[in-house]
Amino acid sequence: MAPPAPIVALQGASVTFGGRPLFEGVDVAVGRGDKACLVGRNGSGKSTLMKVLAGMVAADGGERFVQPGARIAYLPQEPDFTGFASVHDYVAAGLPETERDEAHRVDAVLDRLQIDGGLAPASLSGGEARRAALARTLVGNPDVMLLDEPTNHLDLPTIEWLESELQAFRGGLLLISHDRAFLNHLARRTLWLDRGGLRVSDKPFARFEEWQAEVFAADEAASHKLDRKIEGEMKWLREGISARRTRNMGRVRALLQLRTDRAERIKGGQQAKLAISEAERGGRLVIEAERIAKTFDTPDGPRPIVRDFSTRILRGDRIGVIGPNGAGKSTLLKMLTGQMEPDSGVIRLGTSLEIAYFDQRRATLDPEDTVRHVLCPYGGDRVVVNGESRHVAGYMKDFLFDTRQLDSPVKALSGGERNRLILARLFARPSNLMILDEPTNDLDMDTLDLLEEVLGDYQGTLLLVSHDRDFLDRLVTSTIALEGDGSAAEYAGGYSDYLLQRPPRDTPAPAAAPKAKPAAPAAVTAPKARGKLSYKDQRELDELPARLDRLAAEIGRLEGMLADPDLFTRDPAAFTRAGESLHARQAELAAAEERWLELESLREELEGGRG
């Protein structure tokens, strides 16, 4: 099928920043019906490329084409409200000049996004500012929408509503987002800005990691005959991906077991509570809430935040907290950690709690500080992590820093690097209870991968507020959902599990009336009535671990062959065969891992349903 005719396009586009090319020779086009995403490492130039495509920034080289009369709408990461007295005025500026008298369209889109047009821009919260910017983008009925991090600061109901709007959008769409679930549901094509060039795949974003691994493996193979320096860099990248995948499978197994244990405790309720002992309170028990309630007085009358809610959190639990903006998620965290008293009910805290806290506003960094001083504020070059003393340079590498940045000032770091530095400092502090309030906002995917990896290894207890559904699914053992009307309940598993378990709601959630809710992943499909896996599925599940081990061993052997710098010169045919075999085994391993996760999740659900 031929691609749609471009509505807006760049040909040979180049941008130079600080004397070096940010990207060059880039060709990109967006046509009607196109739904594509633009991905790349932090600092690779994604936002700049989108601004060039939108006509907001002039390229240093190349050409830009726009169909005559086409409407191009651009959503920036940080909307600029300068010169606008109200939200209504700001949104109305998104109408074409010839349609500025159609104020009813502004009112309609503000109503759909549930934001007051009379508000002053300076008074807006992060979520309200993002919804106002979305309203301005939508109001002009554009032919193409270029959206830079559209889900930042949005709550889950609004994200789901936005997904349904974009799924129904018939024009062209290009997205930059760190929200994997959002991209999985929308992006049918993937543009990857990588080392100054643009790679294009007609596969959906859900296949990106597989494609990325293939590209890295191919680059590593090519580097043996092109450039030894590139060879070393690509070997480091591939080893990191391979090692991360191996570790992630172990984490998946551990997470499934933790979810099973947590589900039993949630179901057990009063029975589990009777088993509390003093020894448990001294170490294993972290937080216990018994029938707590909280109500705030507002100009419109009493507003319940939570009522009659109970939970018991033990060491090692990972609890996700979700709900619409303003539902009281941060308030609940404050009550559970003893910072705020409930109106009624009892909160019991374990002893010897050492709390690390990451708030929505992020910890501040002194721009004149060096990276070394941020991580070693008392001097020296050692960082103690989990009781182990490590050199600060080695610890930096865990957070994707180059050791040459050790004495760089904070002000020289990119936004993503500053976020990674904050996380590195947070995890270097001893803690057994970590509270993360919206940690994924504004983070690039590399940092999200890193955060997920570090949290997966964390031995303490985690309380996590997030609107990132994929992040929750990968990390938490249970989910506390605040529905915005004072009701709160805990569900075993992540966000997808919550969707399956929650009771039907009589009224749509605030700021969201999704036309079509995204289907749950195959890994959490509702169990069938038979109560156990079929003989064929059980046999396949039993055989998969050994198959995974064999594939991992084969991949290691092939990577060892390709690491031989003389192999290509000595035997080009063997080098080519090894590269092809490596690609095939990596794809086979990825498919086997997905199948194992699907079967294991189905088995857990079937056995749970049978019980």
Image: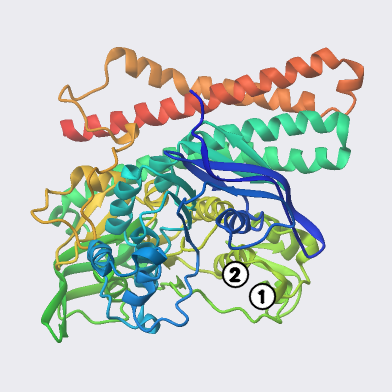
Name the disc covering residue 314, or none: none
Q: Position of residue 495 (x, y in %)?
A: 31, 49
Residue at figure coordinates x 30%, y 51% from the top left: 160
Q: Position of residue 43 (x, y in %)?
A: 66, 58
Give the side of residue 276 with respect to residue 300, left or right.
Answer: right
Q: Is residue 345 above or below residue 65?
A: below
Give the side of residue 301 with respect to residue 25, left or right.
Answer: left
Q: Is residue 133 above or below residue 570?
A: below
Q: Is residue 375 above or below residue 83?
A: above
Residue at figure coordinates x 77%, y 17% from the top left: 576
Name the disc covering residue 374, or none: 1
The answer to which of 32 and 522 lies nearer the viewer is: 32
- Label 2: how many Cα within 10 Å (few below 14, some 14–19, many 20+): some
Name the disc covering residue 425, or none: 2
Quadrant of residue 305 in the image? bottom left
Tell me, what colour scheme is on the image?
rainbow
In the rendered structure, which disc, 1 or 2, sits on the residue that comes first in sequence? 1
User: As shown in the figure, which amino acid type bears the numbered disc 1?
Assistant: Val
Give the SS element for disc 2. Answer: helix
- Label 1: how many Cα within 10 Å (few below 14, some 14–19, many 20+): some
Estimate the spatial distance between the alpha carbons at disc 1 and disc 2, rounded to whole Å: 7 Å
Residue at figure coordinates x 27%, y 71% from the top left: 115
Quadrant of residue 107 in the image? bottom left
Give the SS element for disc 1. Answer: helix
Quadrant of residue 338 in the image? bottom left
Query: Is residue 293 visible to us here?
Result: no
Q: Position of residue 351 (x, y in %)?
A: 36, 73
